[in-house]
Amino acid sequence: MEVDQKPIVVLKFGGTSLSDADTIRNSAKYAIREHETYRQVIVVVSAMAGETNRLLSMGRQFGHVLDTSRQREFDALVSTGEQVSAALMAMAIQEKGVAARSLTAHQIKIHTDNRFQSARIISIDSSELLRVLQQNMIAVVTGFQGIDSDGNIVTLGRGGSDTTAVALAVALNADSCKIYTDVKGVYTTDPTILPKSRLLKTLFFEEMIELASSGAKVLQIRSVELAMKNNMEIHVRSSISETPGTRVISERKGLETLTVTAIAHDDNQAKIAIVGLENYPDILSRVLEPLANANIVLDLITQNVGVDGKMTVSFTINECDLEASQKCLDSAISEGLSGDIFVERKLVKISAVGIGMRTHSGIAHKVFKLLNDQGIPILMGLSTEIKVSCIIPAEFRNQAIAVLHEGLELYKLGQ
Ligand code: ASP
Ligand code: MG
């Protein structure tokens, strides 16, 4: 006899959809609606709005996060935000007469590696979750957390609830994975900067990964990588308005592909140039080694030789890493590295992203020309298969976004 298997749906709610009793009730409504339409429902929750930051700053009152034992307690601390919202969400669902149960990563065995603050999910033992679903209950799972092989609570990095949702959808072979947020979906650019920006109906996984790594904050990059690897469509939706949202998919079948799909921006960038370096073949790795040892993340990197035969190495970093980077380089110079350091602050990175760039040439030139024609200086540029990025002074950010949005014809064609 064939078992009547209801489809499984995973819904994830971000902090702004869980900021107080009313928004939690509102989010619960979506879960109940899915349940009523004959689905097995898993809800993944973030911490309530602002809660993770609050917990982090409480933890920071007790010294630096240096040794492993302190990191362990940090994760034990910040993971509690999700436990609170899971219990409240389960109560909000129960209040409407539907059975629900909150479950922590420990209770459903979300196994991860042992990297505190940035753990990766290794496996999910779905048996407890299935048991709850089979009892016709809505399972409310804490996002952002897992357990390592020693049973420690670990967290998955900021924004990690998205990854929990996708991982559960993949592990349980869900029919769909809906990420509810406070925006209507993914836009052609940040609508708070350019109100004319357009909501995208669909977007490729690769494009979403590039946008997320270029400053777009809708989804955690790792969640999209995981979804792409497993071909799990992500549906980004609004918890405040009944709009169709954006589907992040692997193929945009039968639709014309635009060359550039969206423009992202990354604020608070700084550029460091080390000028007058000796032209040794390994100079780049010599310069970057102390920064790598200090775990400083570099973004764009260039090296070039001047007419005097001396080398210049330039790179961009997040402004918050500026002081630490300067310290590393100062000590490298005092230990014998010859060169002068030049710093530029208050920069932004603007990136135009689109899979159509693979088959169109000249996009980098077009981007640079559009900006230069407006007198916007480009301090560094980078072009990859599906992305063109420029580092420009922050004061030109909004103008650059508007010019590129217009010049690259992002108003065109609803996708
Ligand atoms: N609460 C965590 C954070 O703020 C995880 C998440 O929201 O996805 O980063
Ligand atoms: Mg988020």
Image: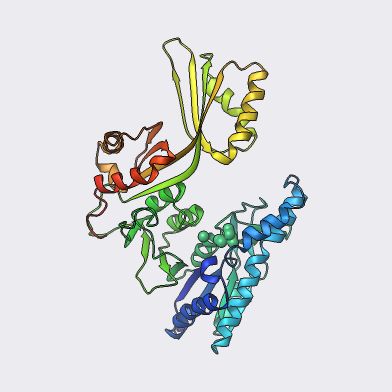
Choose between 271 and 88: the one closer to the eye.
271
Quarter of the image holding residue 73? bottom right
Quarter of the image holding residue 72? bottom right
Q: Looking at the picture, how far across and down is residue 41, in whole percent?
A: 50, 77
Please name the residue shown 72% across and 47% down the image. Answer: 65
Q: Is residue 176 above or below residue 5?
A: above
Q: Looking at the picture, how far across and down is residue 223, in whole percent?
A: 49, 57
Specify whether 247 is left or right of 76: left
Q: Which quarter of the rendering shows the C terminus?
A: bottom left
Q: Looking at the picture, how far across and down is residue 51, in whole percent?
A: 62, 63
Choose between 344 and 55: the one closer to the eye.
344
Specify whether 316 is left or right of 391: right
Q: Which quarter of the rendering shows the N terminus?
A: bottom left
Choose between 413 and 234: the one closer to the eye.
413
Please name the residue shown 49% across and 78% down the image. Answer: 26
Choose between 108 and 295: the one closer to the eye.
295
Q: Is residue 347 above or below residue 190?
A: above
Please name the residue shown 45% across and 48% down the image. Answer: 215
